[in-house]
Image: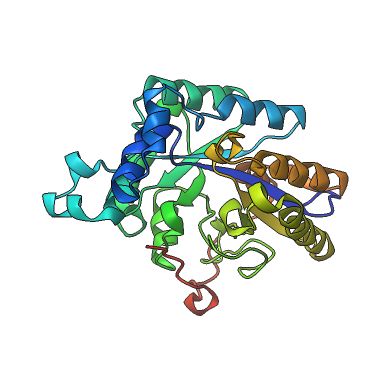
Amino acid sequence: MLDGHSFALCLTHDVDRPYKTYQSGYYAVTERDVSHLTAALRGKNPYWQFEELLALEDSLDVRSAFYFLDEQNLFRDRPVRDWLDPGNWKRYVGRYDLSDPNIVDLIRELDDGGWEVGLHGSYESYDDPERLAGEKQRIESILGGEVIGGRQHYLNLDVPETWRHHADLGLKYDASLGSSSTYGFQYGDSIHRPFGDEFVVFPLTIMEVALPSPTEHLERAWRECRAVLDEAREREAITTILWHPRYFSETDFPGYRELYRRIVEYALEAGAWVGPPAELYDRLDHPPEASGEAATSDYKTTSQH
């Protein structure tokens, strides 16, 4: 499976908020922080980091996966009673539309360049297969090809039903099993096959927000990541990391881009296979038929509402 590599490192990015201007209203209302509005009025958008991100990965000769979100609009799609809940502002305000020409061009550029384009299932889609099917179809209509995997927004899962919905829709893998507050191998050091067939779960090993802040403690964050990578090599593990694209902004999140670079460089120097989950999925030996039902006791429901 690893073809002589010491371990595998899957690189993933959830595309949640590529426009800081959209998020400004949320912070101004819920946290009374007008600095975000000030940046918006100046026409700056430090969250659009795709050129920098792709250039970084290209310089390291690696590719990754980008999961795109088709989220509801608070004022168009939600009942009026939801407008007064600050949590709903965070969930539904400041997102983007898949029909945005910039997003369309980005999806096609990624695909043309060898990056994986996947599905970032919206907040409520984890238990709504009809909604999830529509989101998958919309991304595929832009991509002009098949989406084979992705991750649920907020890591929302109803185990094993969410995975059953994924499999029924033709998805081959999910990368939602994990945590936004802890890192390491709590969810395993290899893939899971919840139905004993070709459908695969890639556990999330590190999400950037779970780490000590590289902005304030870069070397400490790096020591933690290096320890995880060293353990991955010892275990011959399959690891997955998540870096949201906005965290590549040196203006808003200094240190995160450097930490990501160090992780990828260290993994490559250690002889790891590095790339997007879809590419690793194609390297796996898959059973021809289902051999059993999901053992729900083996997993935790990770819905992080």
Residue drawn 51% across and 76% down? Answer: 295
**132 or 89: nearer the eye?**
89
Coordinates of residue 129 in the picture (x, y in percent) = 32, 53
Residue drawn 43% across and 68% down? Answer: 159
Coloring basis for residues? rainbow
**131 or 72: nearer the eye?**
72
Task: Specify whether residue 114 is in view.
Answer: no
Q: Report the label total.
A: 0
Coordinates of residue 229 in the picture (x, y in percent) = 78, 57
Residue drawn 35% across and 41% down? Answer: 135
Q: Is residue 109 left or right of residue 231?
A: left
Residue 94 vs 79, above or below: the answer is: above
Coordinates of residue 186 in the picture (x, y in percent) = 63, 70
Query: Which residue of the protein is positioned furthest toward the left in this rendering?
Result: 80
Task: Specify whether residue 225 is in view.
Answer: yes
Res 224 quadrant in image: bottom right
Location of the C terminus by quadrant is: bottom left
Q: Is residue 79 left or right of residue 209?
A: left
Residue 15 vs 301, above or below: the answer is: above
